């Protein structure tokens, strides 16, 4: 008689997921050719060719893949290093636009406004290539990053099941933890791209496992409360104010 192993407690599973995403993000961020090339380029290509995923998951991973390929070719000297960060930012804008259109389709109108605010203030994301990785150079963008984090999770809970919303809490916390650990807000842009790429790999390849093991009734109730119009209005106002604050501080700086 075979016995199935007991499932991990969700708190432990969440910590493992967070640790894996943080580790994968750091490795791929600071190893542009091997870590990034294998984990963030080769593996996603295989996943996109072999595994099934919904349209937005494939679109998101494909856009992120383009950015990770550009890191490799920039490191090898085949792409102008002064073009890299602007190109990455335009890919990010494309992702935000895709999500905003999906939010509109899902009637998440307050989050559409947050997405527009993020797009309108995204020019603060300026940076430079440092030889093996890139950073942003405007410290005011940390407020933009906070707004992006709130907006992105709000998007996820409308687009996906509660379990994926739980998963993306780890995905969005990871780059913030790395930024805090390094005390360098300039790292957020590269960490955000790499954490989402690593997370996209697991979301597509392990989706059934995540949906089976991250079901949480308390979080589902919290998400239902977040989706109420008064809460959505508050989240939108906070996001817009953070974007305005970013512009003000960038202008002062």
Image (cartoon, rainbow, N blue to C red):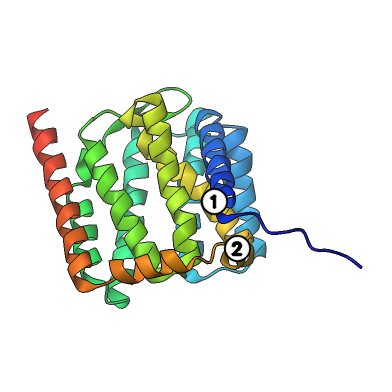
> Which residue position holds label 2?
213
Expressed as whole percent of the image width and height from the top left, the position of residue 19 reads 55, 40
Q: Residue at x 43, y 65 (%)?
A: 218
> Which residue position holds label 1?
11
Within-10-Å neighbours for mark 2: few <14, some 14–19, many 20+: some
| Residue 198 in view here | yes
Expressed as whole percent of the image width and height from the top left, the position of residue 79 reads 45, 34
Tag 1, which secondary structure? helix
Tag 2, which secondary structure? helix
Q: Check the image and report above or below for 146 versus 229.
A: above
Q: Check the image and report above or below for 138 versus 169.
A: above
The foreground one among 23 and 252 is 23
Expressed as whole percent of the image width and height from the top left, the position of residue 233 reads 17, 65
The single residue placed furthest to the right in the displayed view is 1
Q: Quadrant of residue 23?
A: top right
| Side of 215 where 2 appears, left or right | right
Identify the disc placed on residue 75. none
* Disc number lying in front (2 or 1): 1
The foreground one among 95 and 6 is 6
């Amino acid at each position: 008689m075979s016995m199935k192993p007991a499932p991990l407690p969700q708190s432990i599973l969440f910590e493992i997921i967070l640790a894996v995403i943080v580790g994968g993000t750091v490795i791929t961020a600071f190893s542009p050719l091997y870590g990034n090339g294998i984990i963030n380029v080769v593996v996603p290509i295989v996943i996109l060719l072999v595994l099934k995923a919904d349209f937005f998951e494939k679109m998101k991973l494909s856009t992120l893949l383009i950015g990770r390929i550009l890191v490799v070719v920039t490191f090898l000297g085949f792409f102008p290093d002064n073009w890299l960060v602007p190109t990455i930012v335009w890919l990010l804008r494309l992702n935000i636009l895709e999500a905003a259109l999906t939010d509109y389709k899902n009637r998440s109108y307050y989050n559409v406004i947050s997405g527009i605010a993020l797009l309108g203030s995204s020019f603060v994301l300026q940076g430079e290539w440092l030889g093996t990785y890139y950073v942003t150079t405007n410290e005011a963008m940390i407020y933009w990053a906070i707004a992006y984090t709130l907006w992105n999770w709000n998007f996820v809970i409308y687009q996906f099941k509660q379990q994926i919303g739980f998963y993306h809490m780890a995905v969005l916390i990871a780059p913030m933890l790395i930024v805090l650990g390094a005390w360098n807000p300039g790292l957020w842009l590269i960490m955000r791209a790499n954490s989402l790429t690593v997370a996209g790999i697991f979301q597509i390849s392990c989706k059934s496992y995540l949906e089976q093991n991250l079901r949480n009734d308390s979080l589902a109730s919290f998400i239902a409360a977040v989706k109420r119009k008064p809460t959505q209005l508050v989240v939108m106002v906070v996001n817009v104010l953070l974007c305005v604050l970013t512009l003000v501080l960038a202008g002062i700086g």
